[in-house]
Amino acid sequence: MTDAAPLLEVEDLRVEFGKGADTASVLNGVSYRVEAGETLAVLGESGSGKSVTAQTIMGILDTPPGRITGGAVRFKGEELLGADRERRRLLRGESMAMIFQDALSALNPVYTVGAQIAEQFRFRRGMSKKDAMVRAAELLDQVKIPNAKQRVKEYPHQFSGGMRQRAMIAMSLALDPELLIADEPTTALDVTVQAQIMELLDELRRERDMGMILITHDLGVVAEVADRIAVMYAGRIVEEADAATLYAHPAHPYTRGLMASVPRLDSSRGQLDPIPGLPPSLTNIPPGCPFHPRCAHADFRGRAPQSSVSGDRCRTELPLLRVLEDPAAGPEGHRAACHFAEQFVAASPEEVLTP
Amino acid sequence: MGRYTLRRLLQLVPVFLGTTLIIYYLVWGLSDDPFAGKCGQRECPAPYVATMTARLNLDDPVIVQWLKYLGGLLTGDFGRTFSGNEVSDLIANAAPVSFRLALVAVVVEIVIGITAGLVSGLRGRGYVDSLILVSTLFLISLPVFVTGLVVKQVLGVELGWIRTSVPPDPTILDLFVPGLVLGSLSMAFVARLTRTSLMENSRADFVRTAVAKGLSRRRVVLAHMLRTSLIPVVTFIGTDLGALMGGAVVTEGVFNIRGLGGLVFTGIQRQEQTQVVGVVALLVIIYLVVNLIVDLLYAVLDPRIRYD
Amino acid sequence: MTDTLRQEPSLAGHDEGAVVSPEAESGLWSDAWKQLRRRPLFIISGVVIIVLLVMALFPSLFTSVDPTFQVLDRSGEAPNASSWFGRDLFGRDVYARAIYGAGPSLAVGLLASLGTVVVGSLAGLTMGYFRGLTDSVLSRIGEIFAGIPFVLGGIVILTSLNKPGEIVGSTRLIVQVVLTIVLLSWPLAMRIMRAAALASSQQDYVKAARALGAGPLRIMFRHMLPNCLAPVLVYGTIQLGVFIGAEATLSYLGIGLKDPVVSWGVMISEVQARIIQMPHALFFPAAFLVVTVLAFVMMGDALRDALDPRGR
């Protein structure tokens, strides 16, 4: 498997929005890869570029206002960014499919759920309307919607939130894609339903040996299902490792911040530590490390034991994503974009959190 | 669906009653002496006054007169004019002309309006879009009688392409230019509405889903964008029919078409109250029925409405 | 930047934007103003409207000719050096009449638009606040008036108010025309206000005001109205133009304003039988009319674009 081209490879992807002084650099060199049967979780706050990356991979980014200014997206070795529109259209649904956050607005209100699933069978497989509806019912059954035969005839607004997301999943699986991109699939749902949907997605991925990109800002969602995790900040990957490694010793202060802001039942400390400040404006990304204005470690003077850490480098020099020496990391290694990543890797998650 | 239809139907009843009462009151209740000027310079002869008073129930309070009139309407009796004509006969003669005119206008509105909106909305910003935006804005600002007078002057008098006066029993072709004039305002609205609706929907999440499903551009546009975008357009065309009928009165005047508008006018000039009330009541009924149909159509087009 | 906001709806933070607070509203207006200042459509229509207003208030600035002065032997004269727009059937100066026509035309448009917006807004606000029975009853009443086709309703009302041949003073005529337009048009303004009021009455700040014990009037006017004003204002501006056209239509039909009142509609009505002999007497008032209506419709369009954040 390692010899062959990976299922999906994103390399140094750059996307801008707007023009002139208002240009927002939404993606500033994003790279990641997904293998068949693997789940990559892409983690980050709103505006970090998670969804834009996904839309660029799918080829559904609105251009304009969006503009791809560089990089590559390769599906099984085939370069997609330069490919012609028809080729890309045929890949959609067939090779890669996407699930959106808000299934209510992502489903067309004026067609029955069944008709929307059947659409792909009819127009991509040339099936008759009747056969397509039968297949749609089968799919609804596969995503564990009870009474599938009746429910195919219902409209999206007649479904509950969880059922709608199941229908959305069924739709994405219609043409047996090899890669499934789930963009915040559980954000709009109740906590109990969230777990069911994640379980379903994980099960389907295993059955079908699909690659899956799971976009979320919720660490709790990721823990259960992700093989590897990529953390994004201001249009860049700032840390990437297999799930266990990342949880055990996160190497980027931002990752640590995210973890500290999640309530944990087993935490000895009763309080949460939200990351201070707001994500940077993408029209005006801070120089140096984009995270430095919010980073508790960017300026240590007189406060922390690691006096060797100086704040100036964080303000002036952009840290690149590099492989860390982390013996505990899996075969994919542990990468982070922080000048002082080594110091954090060595420490336990809680240790450096409170400078 | 059945309950929805029934509810809408029931809601029509008070509207119909209220509208006809207002019209009836304005026409009959406000005139002190309905016989003034009816018999030339002289007073009307007593027996004539007596017959007409009895036939029109003029001795009753206006509200009772109106109820009796409604009773007549239910049996298809629109009453008789002072000069002895059956109002239903007058309407039967004039209505087909007006309907043909309205038909031409609505077809123009739908075909040209939606096409222009489509072109403008799908092409996005550019030369064609600006042209359509400016020309529709211009059409919206032109009162129908101005468009009519100018068209008649230019096409009829100066170029001689059309007859300035439409023949008594006009064909659809005779009514083409008047219909175009009548429909021009609504056509502009339809074009703009289609464009806005299309542009809004082209950014909708469900359209992105349709693209992500790998459907062809054609399928995305026709089945997902257009289908949803036309819902407000259909509603507009229905509610706009009232304005269209009003405009028809003006257009008929400009092009000398003998339709329902003419009936209202001659009715007012000759003080034939029955004639005025009859035609207006008919137009109100048509308006309400068309609105009901549009409402039901709306429910068919947008399933979200059906179950509230 | 706005485009990025659309891509990533919560770029600025998580739960903002769901509730538009009254404070955000003042931002809406100042944002709209910033937008408008750069729009050529707004500037052009604004200039035209200012010129028209000056013309309506001080017609003598534009002409020294009496618009009612008749020179019968110059009837129907084509445009020439002494009378730029020519003369009408009674030998009156078309240019002077077109200038003086601005006053009554604008007065009717302005008053009718104001009346429609006030009546419609009050009704819509009440419906949005009280809902239920009040809403249904007012809805039905609105439908009754909306069910009467405008021109037909205008004909019936105006001919019932004045007996044929009756001489009516100009102020009374203007008031009658304005009231007729308001009576037949308020339901539209009501619908727009009602929709906005229904949405705003569900917002948290209204619920909060209610929980704090604010009375209905205070909630309606202090909390709901400022947030519902934008769409009605846009409607009012566009309708101002449309109503000027409506006045002209009614006058054209001979049931609106009449001589000696000068309005563009009156001028067109007077010439309609003789267009072939004197097209200029149709063209100039019609041009004034169209430019005026266009200016208000364009202004309304620009306002809507600026006030509706979805369109940006």
Image (cartoon, rainbow, N blue to C red):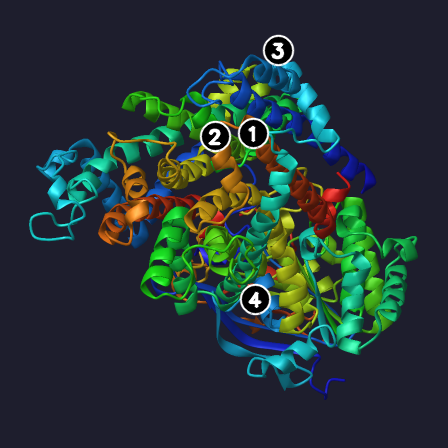
Helix, strand or loop under label 2:
loop
Q: In this figure, which residue is indicated by the disc labeled 2?
A: B270
The picture places residue B297, in percent across and down from the top left corner, at: 70, 49
Quarter of the image where one finds residue B1: top right
Mark in front: 2 vs 4 = 2
Residue B206 visible in the picture: yes
Going by the numbered disc 3, the residue's amino acid type is Asp
Residue at x 92% of width, y 53% of height: A147
How many numbered marks appear? 4
Q: Are marks 3 and 4 in contact (CB under 8 Å)?
A: no
Query: Numbered disc 4: what chain?
Result: A
Question: Is C186 or B69 nearer to us in this picture?
Answer: B69
What separation in Å lies between label 1 and label 3 (alpha carbons)? 20 Å
Same chain for marks 2 and 1? yes
Q: Are marks 2 and 1 in contact (CB under 8 Å)?
A: yes
Instruction: Left or right? Give the position of A91 relative to A163.
Output: left
The picture places residue A117, in percent across and down from the top left corner, at: 79, 64
**Vertical relation: C103 (above or below) B128:** above
Same chain for marks 3 and 2? yes
Say few, some or many: other residues with alpha carbon within 10 Å of mark 1 (under 14 / 14 to 19 / 20 or more): few
**Vertical relation: B28 (above or below) A275:** above
Say few, some or many: other residues with alpha carbon within 10 Å of mark 4 (under 14 / 14 to 19 / 20 or more): many
Mark in front: 1 vs 3 = 1
Q: Are marks 3 and 2 in contact (CB under 8 Å)?
A: no
Q: Earlier in the sequence, mark 2 or mark 1?
A: 1
Q: In this figure, which residue is indicated by the disc labeled 4?
A: A237
> If the image is split into quadrants, where does the C terminus of chain B sit?
top right
Q: What label sits on residue C154 in the rendered view? A: none
What separation in Å lies between label 3 and label 4 (alpha carbons)? 90 Å
Q: Earlier in the sequence, mark 1 or mark 3?
A: 3
